[in-house]
């Protein structure tokens, strides 16, 4: 039990250190009391769009996709969450704005939203930081939807590779998902994505080995998301 408590406290501290500047042992201890560790199997749903909930999540291991379901019932993938990232801060507004599903067996730290709200009331710096996180998540969602409507598929793929390069801090990037899921993420078909990748390879803009993509064209460095 001591090992479990120690592990949970370390995860809470990792989450707090990653997200907030106002880090202190009292804050960590208070959050830790109401947090729990959840395990989700591959394809298991964490929450649905418009659903009321109690938790913000910090992904310890595994892979999670965030997606929306449009009016026609079509799934639109918004983001893939990797270990060490947190998500679901929008629940502080009352409901989850997106759906979340585990794409592999995943372990998560579930942070109680009411406890975080209590801490926010006591610490205005923390409140500003949490509101900034929520605003960033909303802006990312808005920009993503804007890219879907304004950019063609090739431009979306180039923008995606450029963002991935920034995240991985390298021009040699590893795609975090199979081509069929990437095509869904880019709102196209696997066949069309294959044609675009072949065109970029033939134009010596990228090199592809499995899921490893090397960016060798100037457009990627200049492309803005």
Image: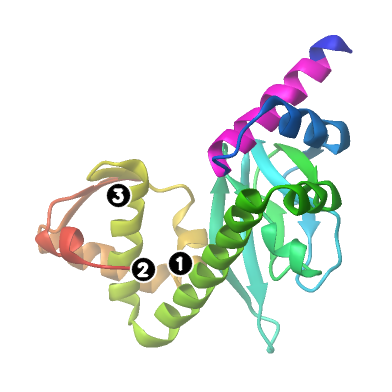
Q: Is residue 16 magenta?
A: yes
Above or below, comparing residue 171 to residue 186 in the picture: above
Q: Please state, as top left, top right, bottom left or bottom right, where the N terminus lies in the image.
A: top right
- Label 2 sits on a secondary structure element that is helix
Q: Mark 2 or 3 closer to N-term?
A: 3
Q: Does the magenta stretch include residue 175?
A: no
| Distance of label 2 from label 1 (alpha carbons) | 6 Å
Across and down, in percent, residue 17 comes to 57, 34
Where, by quadrant of the figure, is residue 37 drawn? top right
| Distance of label 1 from label 3 (alpha carbons) | 18 Å
Above or below, comparing residue 49 to residue 100 in the picture: below
Q: Mark 1 points at which residue?
A: 183
* Residue 7 makes an appearance in the image: yes
Please report the bounds of the magenta region as a residue range. 4-19
- Label 3 sits on a secondary structure element that is helix
Q: Mark 2 or 1 closer to N-term?
A: 1
Q: Name the residue under label 3.
A: 165
Across and down, in percent, residue 181 comes to 52, 60
């Amino acid at each position: 039990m001591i090992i479990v408590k120690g592990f949970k406290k370390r995860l809470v501290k990792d989450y707090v250190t990653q997200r907030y500047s106002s880090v202190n042992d009292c804050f960590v201890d208070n959050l830790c009391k109401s947090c729990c560790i959840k395990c989700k199997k591959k394809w298991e749903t964490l929450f649905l769009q418009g659903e009321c909930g109690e938790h913000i999540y910090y992904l310890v291991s595994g892979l999670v996709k965030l997606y929306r379901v449009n009016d026609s019932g079509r799934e639109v993938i918004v983001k893939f969450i990797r270990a060490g990232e947190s998500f679901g801060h929008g629940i502080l507004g009352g409901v989850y704005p997106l759906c979340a599903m585990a794409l592999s067996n995943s372990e998560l730290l579930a942070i109680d939203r009411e406890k975080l709200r209590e801490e926010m009331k006591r610490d205005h710096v923390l409140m500003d930081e949490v509101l900034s996180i929520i605003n960033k998540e909303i802006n990312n969602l808005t920009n993503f939807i804007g890219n879907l409507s304004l950019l063609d598929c090739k431009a979306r793929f180039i923008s995606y590779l450029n963002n991935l390069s920034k995240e991985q801090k390298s021009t040699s990037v590893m795609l975090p998902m199979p081509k069929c899921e990437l095509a869904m993420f880019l709102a196209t078909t696997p066949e069309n994505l294959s044609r675009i990748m072949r065109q970029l390879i033939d134009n010596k803009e990228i090199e592809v080995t499995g899921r490893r993509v090397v960016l060798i064209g100037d457009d990627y460095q200049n492309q803005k998301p």
